[in-house]
Image: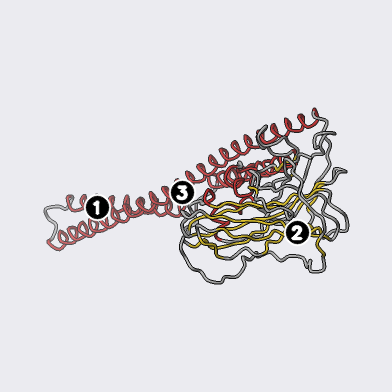
Amino acid sequence: MKIRRILATAVVAAVTTPAVLLSVTPAFADGKPAAQTQEKPSVAELKKAAAAAQAAYDDAVAAESAAYAAMEAIFSATDPAVVAAQAAAAEAATAKTEADQAVVDATTALDELKDTATDAERAAAEAALTEAETAATAADAAKADADAELAAALEARDDERVAAARAYDQAKKATKAALADKTAADETLAKAEEEAEEDGEGDGDCIPEAKLTTVVKGLPSTVVAGTKVNFKLRVTNGTDETMDEVFPFAYVHATDRSGLNDLDDLVHLQWSPASSSKWKNVDNEHYMDPISPLKAGAHTDVKMRLTIDASAPAGNGVTFVAGDYWNDNGTCGGSPDLEGYEFVIAAAGSKPGKVDDAKTGTSKPNTSDLKPQSGTSASPVSGSLAATGSSSTSQLALASGAALAMGAGAMFVVRRRKAGSHA
């Protein structure tokens, strides 16, 4: 049987998968060995991506419509502040005109006094002119203030209109970009569906199986750089049916204490069948040889070894584990989640003393009543099956971006292989 994960690892996927696909749970899918072909999304994933792109486009259209309505309302509405300022400015202008005319009238009256006018009459005319000039000066200042307030109100209204116009323009651009993403997603899906049709593939589904559990036992919570630690990966079939082939999955990821610098090249996972003392590297898709078969209610322990190079700085690590199965009748599935067992990396030469085992935050079903399966061995086989999702919410997982590609309760979808495509 040759079966392959869609995304090589959840952590790698978080960095390399296009943004529109990060919201889509990675799926099981058919494929050739990794050396012969590049990994690509399944039709099920692409359907979800297309649906997400459609939803994003619909949201963008709605946002554009709302932005246009807001802009139209701002442009068509009467601004109370502007109306009030306009009225005040008009009133001030009228008052100034009247005051200026009063000055003209007082000046004329003074000039038209006859030589026979008394000193009292002349003093009264001069006082009237002075009063008119004072009132005109005040009216002129009031008009200047009213004009300034009107200018400020008009500027505020214009700023609001400009902001609304810009928001509408941005909304139109967002709609255009969303449409381009939607078109690309639809075209990619259509091409994948056409290829699947040409390949004669059906629509069989792989399903999440919570009773296929993977538990790490004996991994220390602190590992010193430059050392090797042995532990076990227990794979349990808690269902009431035999699984013909079960593929254990294990991936180790590490960073320095800042969480920003990747140490994956300095940490190494190996495994060994229960019946052998020879260590093998976990393959480049983070799978081990299948357990074939794994009977109902049985479990098998896979020996594991974690090696950390002496050059590794102090930091943090997490070992993700899961399991996938494939039956001879074509049914398949796997653990809904990746379990993340966190550990601390101590600098080379450290003496941490006795430490507890690494823990995971996700609760596990009780398998204490399950008995080991006798005579189980791992037979070599090429390929693997997808496992995604994570219970880990550690700073390490967040800092590495793994959380972006891992979702609890993941649903898996697979296209049924053509006859003879898994052997």
Give the x, y percent position of residue 14.
60, 47
Q: CA separation, marks 3 and 1? A: 37 Å
Label 2 or label 1, whichever lies nearer to me, is: 2
- Label 1 belongs to which residue? 103
Label 3: state its secondary structure. helix
Q: CA separation, marks 2 and 1? A: 100 Å
The circle on residue 404 is none
Quadrant location, the N terminus: top right
The residue sitting at the front extreme is 277
Q: Could you tell me which residue is drawn at 61 percent across and 41 percent down? A: 18
Image-based side of 322 in relation to 239, left or right: left
Label 2 or label 3, whichever lies nearer to me, is: 2
Label 3 or label 1, whichever lies nearer to me, is: 3
Q: Could you tell me which residue is drawn at 59 percent across and 65 percent down? A: 220
Judging depth in this view, the residue of 393 and 327 nearest the camera is 327
Q: CA separation, marks 2 and 3? A: 64 Å
The circle on residue 157 is 3
- Label 2 belongs to which residue? 213
